[in-house]
Amino acid sequence: MVPFLWLSQLVHSIFRFFMPPRRPDEMRVFSKVKDITNTSSLLSSLKENHHFLDHGLGNILVTEVEYCKCPFSQDSPGEHEFLLVTLKESGRARRMAYLVVDRLNDDTKKYRGDDELRADLAKHQSEEMNGIEETDSNSSSSSSTSESSTTHASAWHTSSRTHRSIAKVKLAIKGDPPDALDRLIILPNKRDIAAQFDVLMTMDLTQSQKVTLERFTHLLRTTSRNTPQYHLIFAQCYWYAYTIWRVLEMATQPRVYPHSLAKRQCSHRLTGYGNRLVLGKGKSVNAARSPETVKAQWESEKVTEDEEWAELKRALHAPELAAEERRREAEEGRLQAEDAHRKTEDALRESQARERELQRKLEVFERPNRSANAV
């Protein structure tokens, strides 16, 4: 799985280095985001992006999700699975962008060949069939094994020391933050994906309940936090892609179009495509990290998330609102002063009119008296 990630990163980085700056038709909300990032970094960037808070919040929608799988090859022996997400602005310029949504491969176990991997998979299948996947019967092993069991048994619920050892150490791939759980590759078009892959299924969300960029990114973060440690059998790229896909399917009721290779989802050539043993879904996933659990966690966080975004938007416009309030108060003061001045002038004119009327009456009264005195 790693060669796919490195190849995509390398080709895309070279492409971006030699090409001109971002085109006008690229989404401005990604202008301050690295082309290769992760969910936490993207969320942090969006929360500080004034253009996104002002124009993008609630207006950049996930319109399509493609479930992708790399065919078996020397570059992709693990038949890597990932999601290719189409984003589109609902208004304004209606620009588009694409996200490669990917689980980081920090597996420390290296198999010497297909036989060793096949044996590990067969062992897991045997455990699953015997109903002991969620037990831990090796607590009395050696000290190092016991330590591993204590640390990871609650997370993986498996009796396999081999499986638990896979998740012991989390390796950071160069370019990723030390604590990154996932990877997002931002692309202006689909042609920028360097590796060969097949689209197993396509999810159309244009006619379903809308999913915004910020809401989708929160789903990615919730999924990553649910099971932060990579595990070859239980929590790898298959589990990550399938869980996100299934949560969207349950939450939005979209139109899903399976393609000819859809049966290869969450399966490997060593286990047989579409056979009983799958990786990252079904009985290979316990209730604590099932799509239903992740969906419930995601939905429970919605109110808090919405309040945070609303507060960020209010804070963004707080200076403008304060200035507008000052302008409004100044205008009200000016109008009040003008009204007071007008009333004063009206009162003065009324007083002057009364004075003239009294003067006229006085003159009328005094005129007969002057005539009588003259006689």
Image (cartoon, rainbow, N blue to C red):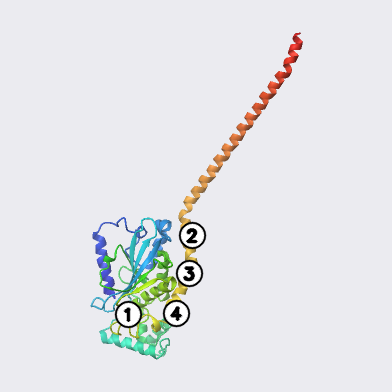
Q: Give the Cα separation between the discs numbered 3 and 4.
A: 17 Å
Circles 1 and 2, Cβ within 8 Å, touching? The answer is no
Dot 1 or dot 2: first in sequence order is 1
Q: Which mark is residue 288?
A: 4
Q: Give the Cα separation between the discs numbered 2 and 3.
A: 16 Å
Q: Which mark is residue 311?
A: 2
Q: Give the Cα separation between the discs numbered 1 and 4.
A: 25 Å
Q: Quadrant of the N terminus?
A: bottom left
Secondary structure at badge 4 equals: helix
Q: Which mark is residue 263?
A: 1
**Side of 217 relative to 338 (left or right):** left
The kind of residue on which mark 4 rests is Ala
Secondary structure at badge 2 equals: helix
**Side of 202 relative to 7 (left or right):** right
Residue 139: % across, % down: 42, 88
Secondary structure at badge 3 equals: loop
Residue 158: % across, % down: 40, 86
The kind of residue on which mark 3 rests is Glu
Q: Give the Cα separation between the discs numbered 1 and 3.
A: 33 Å
Dot 1 or dot 3: first in sequence order is 1
Q: Nearer the viewer, residue 193 or 36?
A: 193
Circles 3 and 4, Cβ within 8 Å, touching? The answer is no
Residue 22: % across, % down: 30, 57
Dot 3 or dot 4: first in sequence order is 4
| Residue at position x 61%, y 35% in the image | 343
Dot 1 or dot 4: first in sequence order is 1
Circles 2 and 3, Cβ within 8 Å, touching? The answer is no
